[in-house]
Amino acid sequence: MIYTTNNSSFPDQVVPDAEKATLDYGLAVGRAIEGEWFRNNGRGNNGYATNYNNYHSLRLYARGEQPVQKYKDELAINGDLSYLNLDWKPVPVISKFVDIVVNGMSQRNYEIKAYAVDPFSTKKRTDYAKELMRDVQERELIQKLRDTLGVDVQSKASKELGLESEEELQLHLQLDYKQSVEIAEEEVINDILDRNRYDLTRRRLCQDLTILGISAVKTSWNKAEGVVIDYVDPANLVYSYTEDPNFEDLYYAGEVKSISLSDLKMQFPYLTDQEMETIQKYPGNQEYLRNWSGKQDDLTVQVLYFEYKSYSDQVFKIKETNTGIEKALEKPDTFNPPENDNFDRVSRTIETLYSGAKILGHPMMLKWELAEHMTRPTADTTRVKMNYTICAPRMYKGRVDSLVNRITGFADMIQLTHLKIQQVLSRVVPDGVYLDMDGLAEVDLGNGTNYNPAEALNMYFQTGSIVGRSLTQDGDPNRGKVPIQELQTGSGGAKIQSLIQTYQYYLQLIRDVTGLNEARDGSTPDKNALVGLQKLAAANSNTATRHLLQAMLYLTSRTCENVSLRVSDSLQFPFTRQALENSISRYNVATLDELSDLNIHDFGIFLELEPDEEEKQVLEQNIQIALKSGGIDLEDAIDLREIKNIKLANQMLKQRRKAKQKRDQQAQQANIQAQAQANAESAEKAALAEMQKQQALAETEVQVEQAKSQFEINKIQQKAEIDRQLLELKYQYDIKLKQMEKEQMDSKEKMIEDRKDERTRIQATQQSQLIDQRKNDLLPTDFEQNQDNPLLG
């Protein structure tokens, strides 16, 4: 028989583990949970129904779909609405504020960081830091050894990084240094979150935190899917009483699900046909059979899935063998032998987690067993974490408060004001005119006809003109000289303005209560307000809802921690291991084997939230100031913008500025030295140039003198050559002259001789003629004529 503790419906926990594992013990736990949440109180409600209806009402308000019966009761007279013709559809004023908060949280990105805190990883990180620190502190000695002995004792990592100060080393360890197991852990966590579509789950968590004030997520593991992350509807949640907003001290938690008989058989295949028929025939409690809209559904079964935290005594028998070796043997917690010299009994108490499933309203347990693959922190294996992660940032004494819950009253008043505005508008009549019939009768249009009302109204509405008479036909003053007068009905306008002011009043109350001002939603920004003031107001509004963002980050961080603790389980089974190998690199899978094989790594999981726009703006201003002053380079600004942590970014900015100043000083000194060296070299070059110039001048003078001498020599030589040529030419001319003279002399002598010969021949001829003349007694001969004509001669 299972006994319960005093003043509690839960079974006694001070029992052996074998009794806790029985189905009767689980049934007692399930009945106790069912009694706490589903037992009606004196007012006909229970805790589960109260939470369900409250959360359902808040969700309707957030959607702008809250029931309108309360508004009808407010405006009805003795329940009679026959005289009201109004649009009862609620004004979705809360939806806007919910979307602002939810979208603002969903847009805040983050990076998952895994930090190995086990002794092995800590030693590896410490050794790495010491090695770099030694190189930084002893860099002068290392350089001296390299210069004098030619021995390089600097580490390879220090050479690649080029660290020069301890500040650079600290920034490197915080920003760049990651061990292989840390990189692998981050990669596998991101992969599991992506496969479970955690981004969609995170948005639902943000909506629940904003609307209901509480969110829950469940992390489980199975051989088919590996690590599974499921969204849990807070309306279906049951848990033990707690005042902790993070629900860290729960001893049971669970949820109610409506599942069909086919799904029930798939989840619990060991149920017999007889048991399934019993479940099908048993109607159960109709209050449990409701879906989201509150309608009954007889085709589903309400199943309570829950986890129950207990404890167990691990007992070991320490026996000493004949060789002196001690051997530990695990025993049941009931093991309590008499004292013996050969062995000792040692034990420790650890937390255990039992998982169960029970049909509500039916005395049948579907499952009760010691949970497999319990998540235990590596730092304290005696503790166990529940699969449910719950957070309600604004909880006091078990009562959960939410942002929407604080403004539903104002939303009701806005809806009533909206209905009143409709009511006033329905009773407002347009402006009219007053016609004085007597005044119209006194008016003669001049064409033999009098003014009639229809023609007067047509003229007034079309032209705005009125024809009237100041005197009657008898000459008396006409009291109706203006026969048409406009009637002003402005009573409804004042009421509407008053109601609009009331509407704005309650809208402003919503902003004041939630902290979502006009700068946050951008609805009515002040045109005279500076941009900086509007950003400051928006930042203050973000501060008002920061607790919701922190709650969402807490849920995500705890989920990542549970995923990290379940990674080793996934690596132990081929199917889930293969899934990891297909999604991440084999190198990281091989690294993650250390988690399952050695079991020495323990990780601290934290989220590095990206800075918001205000923080980015402040950092960007610092970067721009540093760039304009020349404190950093463009490459440094690019690196700084990539850092998500504002604190580390500012530290790196300061470090880069110092490094830039040091480089500038070194460059300036180098420039001074280079300038001095350049001046010395310039002076030396000037002196050398002057010397070369003088030498060149001397050489030039020598060359000039040599040229002159050479010129004189050449001149003399040329003159001698010319004289020689002249002499030769004169000699040739003289020879030719002599030859000519000789030829002339020879010709002259020849001519003389020829003349002598001719005279002699002539003389002989004449002499012969004379002889012939004397002999023949011829006539006298004229020798001169014959001389002129030789033929006659």
Image (cartoon, rainbow, N blue to C red):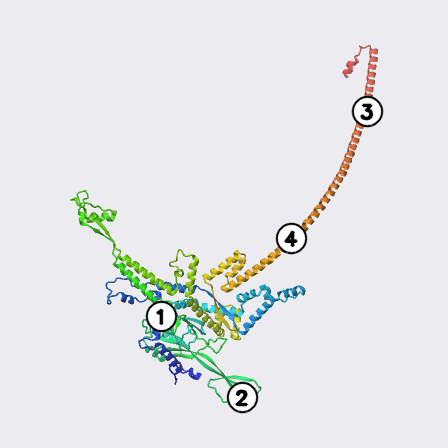
Front one among 525 and 572: 525
Residue 197, visible in the rendered structure: no
> x%, y% of residue 769?
82, 14
- Nearer the observer: mark 3 or 1; the answer is 1
Characterize the local packing of mark 2: few (<14), some (14-19) or many (20 or more) Cα atoms within 10 angstroms: few
Name the residue type under label 3.
Answer: Met
* Cα gap from disc 2 to disc 4, whole angstroms: 92 Å
The residue singled out by tag 3 in the image is 745
In the image, taking residue 29 as reference, residue 701 lies left or right, namely: right
The residue singled out by tag 1 in the image is 55
Name the residue type under label 4.
Answer: Ala
On residue 125, the disc is none
| Quadrant showing the N terminus | bottom left
Q: Earlier in the sequence, mark 3 or mark 2?
A: 2
The residue singled out by tag 2 in the image is 342
Determine whether the residue tagged by mark 2 lies in a helix, strand or loop: loop
Q: Residue furthest toward the front?
A: 477
| Quadrant showing the C terminus | top right
Q: Earlier in the sequence, mark 2 or mark 4?
A: 2
* Cα gap from disc 3 to disc 2, whole angstroms: 172 Å
Q: Residue furthest toward the left?
A: 474
* Residue 173, picture quadrant: bottom right
On residue 678, the disc is 4
